[in-house]
Amino acid sequence: MLETILSARDLSVRFGGVLAVNKVSFDVRRGEIFTLIGPNGAGKTTVFNLISRIYQPTSGSITFEDTTLTDMAPYSIASLGIARTFQNIELFENATVLQNMLIGHHAHRRVGFWGEWFFTPAARRSELDACFLAEEVIELLDLQSYRDAVVAGLPYGIRKVVELARALCTKPKLLLLDEPSSGLNPEETDEMAWWIKDIRKELGVTVLMVEHDMSLVSRVSDRLLAMNQGEVLAQGTPSEVQSHPRRDPGLPWHQRRRTKLAEGRMSTALDLGTAPMVLTLNNVESAYGPVKAVRGVSLQVRRGEIATVLGSNGAGKSTILKTISGVLDPTRGSVHFKGADITAHEPADIVRRGLSHVPEGREVFAMLSVHENLLMGAYTRNDADGVARDLESVYEYFPILRERQKQAAGLLSGGQQQMLAISRANGHAGVDTAR
Ligand SMILES: Nc1ncnc2c1ncn2[C@@H]1O[C@H](COP(=O)(O)OP(=O)(O)OP(=O)(O)O)[C@@H](O)[C@H]1O
Ligand SMILES: [Mg+2]
């Protein structure tokens, strides 16, 4: 029988009327990969926030090794040996990859203020240890070519790996990973699966993970905990949970709707050939300073069409969308929308013309309510009745947004924020959405 490293007992937390986590109990064994699954809003990230002491439970307790976490201050969690990554990547954007990684080391600094001030031999040794560890992690996660790159310029998939690298530099015994595969393509998800297994094998780290991608979940997890609406549905090995009578915790919303949407588009797909061209990119080149991110991109999209840009991380997909929506001016080529040349136009003008962009990181206005965020999407309109009608249809499509319409958007779960970002972008009547 393996020893328990983390134990949650009858854990509950309530936010106003929402019981986000309701009497949840589970044990994570040392050396295992334990995964929380469940639909959007199930309470998975909230469990992570309870472990990291961002939230105080309404009742229940969490024990890590011999320490009762619920008695500890949030800043002491890392020094106990618990590290985490976030569902929305949280890195120091203007620092390099290596600098971000070295920040992790400070959780374990043993040299006092004066030692650092005079840079004593002990302080030097400690810095050196941190550098050696960072280099080892860079090697393990194949980050050599990004070592000195500033994070702000890195593609999403690489940032996810950097966040993982920073967490490893705190020398964790327990690593919490919140949706490690989100934003990654299938090959990168494959790689992530290897890394997670390697981290456990090479570094002996126990992993507690939240994940939606069931292929990754079944490939790496020793045991699962399925949650729904704050409660535990089932727990056990992947096959035990799959054969559990209450196993279906519901798919995340985008997977649930997939079939319906696909069917809905089939009929339109038939007459697309005659539909007018709505967007045309001609030989577009865009750059960030001296770095050319895309070159010679030409594409055409007809009204009603769903066009998808595919490619590995760093291929320039998001750059194409930024160039279309005016966030980035192309250095060469042209963008036409509904017959007009919108190359290098101001984003505000492009939005008014009916072209919306759902950015990668959702970018909801965290302090505004759900309803206010939706109204911001309709900012350019002056047909109050039409706006009210469109809001009603958003609320019908995503009932959770109606329920939470008065709540600050920053307090929604990750998936709920994605629903909001897409609905907000559709706030302009008849918009064409880039995402
Ligand atoms: N600080 C908060 N204040 C109010 N409600 C909150 C807060 N944090 C979380 N919630 C609510 O608690 C519920 C659980 O949220 P949580 O983020 O844990 O979901 P999740 O399982 O991680 O979902 P997702 O898969 O979408 O990331 C949601 O309904 C969310 O809106
Ligand atoms: Mg979450």
Image (cartoon, helix red, strand yellow):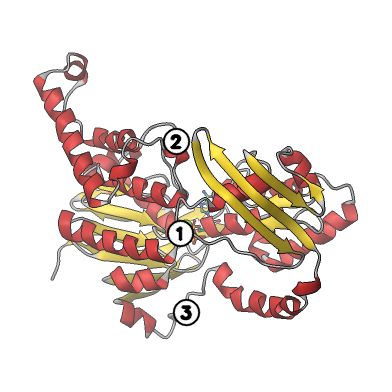
Q: Disc number at residue 182?
A: 1
Badge 2 marks a residue whose secondary structure is loop
Q: Mark 1 vs mark 3: which is more N-terminal?
A: 1
Q: Pick the residue in front: 285 or 16.
A: 285
Mark 2 and mark 3 residues within 8 Å of each other at the beta carbon: no
How far apart are labels 2 and 3 at the CA level?
39 Å
Residue that extends furthest to the left in the rendered view of this protein: 121
Q: In the rendering, which numbered label is found on residue 248?
A: 3
For mark 3, does the 10 Å Cα neighbourhood hold few (<14), some (14 to 19), or many (20 or more) residues?
some
Q: Which disc, if any, is residue 47? A: none
Q: Is mark 1 on a helix, strand or loop?
A: loop
Coordinates of residue 325 in the picture (x, y in percent): 68, 46
Mark 3 belongs to which amino acid? Asp
Label 1 packing within 10 angstroms: few (<14), some (14-19), many (20+): some
The quadrant of the rendering that contains the C terminus is bottom right
Image quadrant where one finds the N terminus? bottom left
* Number of the front mark, 2 or 3: 2
Residue under the image location 53 percent in, 62 percent down: 310
Q: Are marks 1 and 2 in contact (CB under 8 Å)?
A: no
Question: Taking 274 as reference, is 115 left or right?
Answer: left
Q: Could you tell whether 123 is left or right of 227 in the image?
A: left
Q: Residue at x 45, y 55 (%)?
A: 13
The residue to which callout 2 is attached is 93
Residue in front for this viewpoint, 62 or 354: 354
Report whether 222 appears left or right of 155: left
Q: Callout 2 environment at 10 Å: few (<14), some (14 to 19), or many (20+)?
A: some
Q: In which quarter of the image is residue 102?
A: top left
Question: Disc 2 or 3, which lies upstream in sequence?
Answer: 2
